[in-house]
Amino acid sequence: MISVLIMEKSEFNKKIGQYLKKKRLQKKLTQAELASIIGNDFQNISRIERGVLSPTLYWLSKVTDALEMNLGDFIKNALK
């Protein structure tokens, strides 16, 4: 696993976003559906998935709950 300490923010955001998209699609959820479940809007989900927006820990925990995943496992697997 790449150490977060040596990873650029843009790479971190990209990896988190790509993994979020993968897991969302596996659950057969649209961005709008996921956003509705977590109380956010689909534009923010899109920005996170594109690596443009860095999710806060609060929103990432809501996302992983909605995807029925453990937050630590999500981050660990996203950063592989």
Image (cartoon, grey):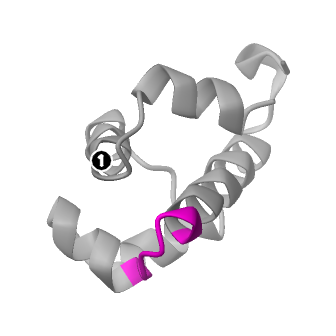
Whether 59 is among the magenta residues is no
Q: Quadrant of the N terminus?
A: top right
Which of these two is toward me, 31 or 11?
31
**Vertical comparison of 40 with 9: above or below:** below
**Vertical comparison of 51 with 28: above or below:** above
Classify residue 79 as left or right of residue 29.
Answer: right
Look at 33% across and 84% down and name the residue there: 32
Q: Which residues are magenta?
A: 25-31
Look at 63% across and 47% down and name the residue there: 16
Q: Quadrant of the C terminus?
A: top right
Q: Quadrant of residue 44?
A: bottom left
Classify residue 11 as left or right of residue 19.
Answer: right
Q: Residue 71: x and y, percent?
A: 42, 28
Residue found at the far front of this picture = 27
Which of these two is toward me, 74 or 56?
74
Query: Which residue position is annotated with label 1?
Result: 59
Q: Residue 68: x and y, percent?
A: 35, 43
